[in-house]
Image (spheres, helix red, strand yellow):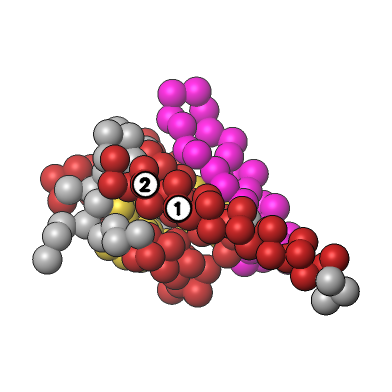
Amino acid sequence: MTEPRVAIVMGSDSDLEIMREAANALAGFGITYEMEITSAHRAPERTASYARHAVERGIRIIIAGAGGAAHLAGVIAAHTILPVIGVPIPSTSLNGLDSLLATVQMPAGIPVATVAIGKAGATNAAILALQILAVGDPELVAKLDAHKEKLARGVEEKARQLKQGG
């Protein structure tokens, strides 16, 4: 089996339904990944160790999803040189706004790319990871081009159906 190129990390098993969207998108492009649960607050040493050793495992990008205080992506970014993409999870009465702000507001020097809240964000995190991996990978570039063309064809089809009264 090929070693994973992307890590999908979440703060709790309650985040799994959303983070599966990232896994599904990566799998659709044939990209290997690993999934892990770790917590910035409940298991800080485990989280730091996971981030510090990611490169050794062949990981090239980390996608981190967390709700509430949502410090997971930032803590991981503090302990690795790998790109980190944060997915805010809507887990509180604030519907993910708290998670979004916690994920996106990083101090200078510790970047976390942040995507939309929830399932769309998880999918976009995977697509962004694919775009990063595609640098220098013509085969992956071709797959991403085909994906964009498929999206455009879908819009054309919906527009055609609308004009036909559907």
Camera-nearest residue between 142 and 90: 142
**Residue wearing tag 2:** 142
Q: Is residue 126 visible?
A: yes
Q: Is residue 90 left or right of residue 164?
A: left
The overriding secondary structure of the stretch rendered in magenta is: loop
Q: Residue at x 32, y 35 (%)?
A: 135
Instruction: Indicate whether 89 appears above or below 83.
Output: below
SS for dot 1: helix
Q: Secondary structure at mark 2?
A: helix
Residue 165, by quadrant, is bottom right
Residue at image coords 35%, 59%: 29
Q: Seen from this angle, which residue lies furthest front? A: 164
In this view of the protein, which residue sits in the foreground, 25 or 141? Answer: 141
Q: Quadrant of the N terminus?
A: bottom left
Q: Position of residue 90 (x, y in %)?
A: 63, 63
User: Label 2 neighbourhood size at 10 Å, few (<14), some (14-19), many (20+)?
Assistant: few
Residue 71 seen in render = no
- Residue 22's x, y, as percent? 44, 62
**Amino acid type of disc 2?**
Ala
Residue 112 on the magenta span? yes
**CB within 8 Å, label 1 to label 2:** yes
Q: Write the residue at 83% across / 68% down.
A: 162
Amino acid type of the residue that numbered disc 1 sits on in the rendered structure: Ala
Q: Along the horizontal axis of the image, is 70 left or right of 141?
A: right
157 vs 124, nearest the viewer: 157
- Return the residue at label 1: 146
Q: Position of residue 155 (x, y in %)?
A: 68, 58
State the extent of the magenta-drawn residues as a range. Answer: 90-116
Tell me where residue 109 sits by quadrant. top left
